[in-house]
Image (cartoon, grey):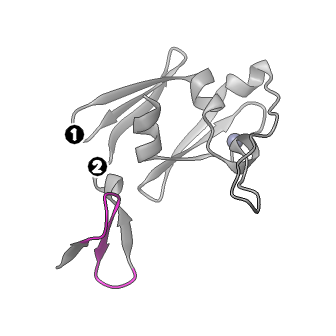
Amino acid sequence: MIFVILNDYDCVKGKNEVIPRMAQLGIDNIASINGEVAIAWQDGTETYLGLEALRRGCPCATCQGEPDAMGRVVRPPVHYKSKSFDLVKMEVVGGYAVSFGWADGHSTGIYSFEYLRALN
Ligand SMILES: [Zn+2]
């Protein structure tokens, strides 16, 4: 097996298969405890994220905006309710990210492991 380092984030395994570097890190355990999401990483570190900060950091286009033709990102107005900070669902997707579902019905944010580490 040959790994070619392309840059800080990606490596290539064989053909047409790009694996984000953080995917190799992985999560041992993730749980919602006392208003926080606790993540135990496979490298032994732990991350604790408050639910409100986690929701406000939702990386989806609805929450964070998309670049316009000039490449400028204008953050859209997001209206939160108290239900917006109630976590109802949590799921590891694709072995590289976590999807969170909130009591107000919002669930489009896919938080990569790398992003979750940076939110800490
Ligand atoms: Zn969002």
User: Residue at left 18%, top 79%?
Assistant: 2
- Residue 46 horizontal side relative to residue 115, left or right: left
Question: Looking at the rendered structure, which numbered label has been put on residue 21?
Answer: none
Indicate the position of residue 100 as horizontal and vertical percent values: 60, 40
Q: Are marks 2 and 1 in contact (CB under 8 Å)?
A: yes
Residue found 65% across the figure and 29% down from its top? 56
- Whether the magenta-drawn stretch holds residue 20 is answered as no
74 vs 71: above or below = above
**Residue at 63% across, 38% down:** 58
Query: Residue 20 at x, y = what percent?
Result: 37, 60
Which residue lies at the image location 31% right of the left edge and 28% below the top edge? 46
What distance separates the C-alpha of mark 2 from that of mark 1?
A: 7 Å
> Helix, strand or loop at disc 2?
loop
Dot 1: element: loop
Up-down: is 55 above or below 61?
above
Q: Quadrant of residue 59?
A: top right
Q: Nearer the viewer, residue 34 or 11?
A: 11
Report the residue that reaches farthest toward the bottom: 15
In the picture, the disc for residue 25 is: 2
In the image, what residue type sits under mark 1?
Asp
Q: Which portion, as a residue range, is magenta? A: 5-16
Question: In which quadrant is the N terminus drawn?
Answer: bottom left
Of residues 74 and 65, the one nearer the viewer is 74
Dot 2 or dot 1, earlier in sequence: 2
Q: Which mark is residue 43?
A: 1
Which quadrant of the render holds ligand 1? top right
Location of residue 7 (image quadrant): bottom left
Which corner quadrant holds the C terminus?
Answer: top left
List x then y, in percent, for residue 61: 71, 50
